[in-house]
Amino acid sequence: MKTSSELRTLLRSIDHKSYPAYKSLAGIYQFPKFSLSIDHVQGDPFASPSSLHVEISHKGAAFPAFCYEKDCSRIALQDFLTRQFASQFEEYNFKAKGSGKSGLLSISHCGQEVLDRSACQITDTKITARFHAGFPAFGRTINAGELEKILFDFLPACVENSFFYAKLDKKKVEAAVFLSEDQEALRKILKEENLTAFVANGSILPRKSGVSDLPMKDSVPFCSPASMERTFTLPHKGTISGMAIPRGITLIVGGGYHGKSTLLEALQTGVYNHIAGDGREYVITDDTAVKLRAEDGRSIRGVNISLFINDLPNKKDTSSFSTPDASGSTSQAAGVMEHMEAGTRLFLIDEDTSATNFMLRDDFMQQVISREKEPITPFLERARDLYEKEGISTILVAGSSGAFFYIADKILQMDCYCPVDITEHVKTLCKEHKAPRIQAPGFQTPDFQRTLPAYNRGKNRSGRDYRGNRSGGGNRHEHMKVKTLGRDSFSLDRETIDLRYVEQLVDSEQTAALAYMLRYALEQVIDGKRTVRQTAQILCDTLEKKGWDPFCSSYIPCGLAVPRKQELFACLNRFRG
């Protein structure tokens, strides 16, 4: 390891040279209170900024052990420190002048959820913070004086004000850690009390706008119906009361614009912890919950959808069904089976984003189109079996059909954004009306032994691969090119993976992580013999035990966030390659 003085000398020696000379700075340098690693130097002032990271020992940072001894505490502290570092960067961003991205200082932009990110990681011995910096230039000539300001003036001040406990507001640090521990305690209570979700009284569920995840001002605070209200004791907050949703089938009904979908959206993000002030801090959902919806046009490979679709006119086998262009009902049927394979214990469904013919068929339609002519067994006829035989609960938003009343265990009416338990009233009415006919064939759980075929990177007619290189075959070549296209998709070489309807991906950094994990799977794991479950488990175990390093090339970048296993399954299932 070189010293910071050596870095200063080297920096001054390349002043006014051609921009590529900056690459000679790559390496590790010891500063008085931290070490600085220059991992990757941009090739041009207009290119993506350079990647760097700093490491601070626990002895130097001096955070109390309770702040990171539990996983939930550690992730909460990492999140707090990332936000603190980002706020420090705002003060110095572009203060160093030059062309292109000169003077840029950036780190992950954290949303309302608390995620485990590569931007800040805490181990047993140190804190590592990864970030980007735009190395300054005059045109395409090195401006060493401005970079010296960044590395020797701006950066030490930002690091000291972000990663040293003595410099931070101790009450804010403690509050972030304690909130996370309370949220984790509430998740544990859900499992112990046989519940699928909890929504605390006073929660603010509506969001500011369609492009802002901040809480809406002057919105109606959530208040539980008395019949569903439970009170629990948390380790730091103390007692908390709110609506507890039991396992089983829960129906959410009500008029338009009364808050049905808003409640469901809050529940679908309740699989993550949220920061203080979000309004949904104590909206906690079973962490395996999955939002199901129709996805016209998605690809399906080898999925057993026979529980829902059988006897197709073209005699196609639905016990191992594949299509490059699924219909809405077929995609939703495949979604149910894929997430059963992923181990989900709760389905969240909004009829607005579902295929109607997948969800139900009324009596009149059953009389006109006989069972023998309809290959679809609707979800209405399978929901009860999914719970009783597989332990998978359902929370369903419905507003157009009363058929779901007959299978529901709990029925909530959203009335002017307030939930009302109308279960007893509706069950009384159900006795006065004819129940829908249930004609579903026997329920059989698939064996979930789907294997992933070995990936063979395509070649054109000249025998060259996508990059124009000749190759002797096989599926383990040089690293495939990864490009993240926001939260909704990424590309791997020339193959685009569309994740826009995987609604519980909340951050583009999770999408980037999925891209890296899929690349690793194709190069190191998928061999044509391992099942989807085995592949996903290997990827999760590798990330947990070895961190980001196996998935990256020469260095770990800032800009990765750990996805759930459910989203990893969704990614594997949507890869057309």
Image: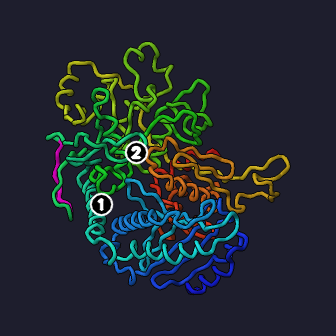
- Residue found at the far right of this picture: 462
- State the residue in front, 218 or 79: 218
Q: Is residue 375 above or below residue 152?
A: above
Q: Position of residue 163 (x, y in %)?
A: 40, 74
Q: Quadrant of the N terminus?
A: bottom right
Number of numbered discs overlaid on the protein picture: 2
- Residue found at the far top of this picture: 368
Q: Position of residue 522 (x, y in %)?
A: 63, 57
Q: Three-letter amino acid code at disc 1? A: Glu
Give the spatial CA distance, label 1 vs label 2.
26 Å
Residue drawn at the location 25% of the way across and 33% of the way down: 414
| Mark 2 burial class by Cα count in 10 Å: few <14, some 14-19, many 20+ | few
Q: Position of residue 192 (x, y in %)?
A: 25, 56
* Quarter of the view holding residue 139: bottom right
- State the residue in front, 106 or 67: 106
Q: Is residue 430 above or below residue 226?
A: above
Q: Earlier in the sequence, mark 1 or mark 2?
A: 1
Q: Is residue 527 visible?
A: yes
| Mark 1 burial class by Cα count in 10 Å: few <14, some 14-19, many 20+ | some
Query: According to the image, label 1 marks what residue?
Result: 184
Q: Three-letter amino acid code at disc 2? A: Ser
Q: Identify the element where label 1 is drawn.
A: helix
User: Is 232 included in the stretch rendered in magenta?
Assistant: yes
Left or right of residue 91, residue 229 in this image = left
Left or right of residue 32, residue 236 in this image = left
- State the residue in front, 326 or 186: 186
Q: Which residues are magenta?
A: 228-234
Query: According to the image, label 2 marks what residue?
Result: 212
User: Is 455 included in the stretch rendered in magenta?
Assistant: no
Query: Which tag is nearer the camera, tag 1 or tag 2?
Result: 2
- State the residue in front, 333 or 228: 228
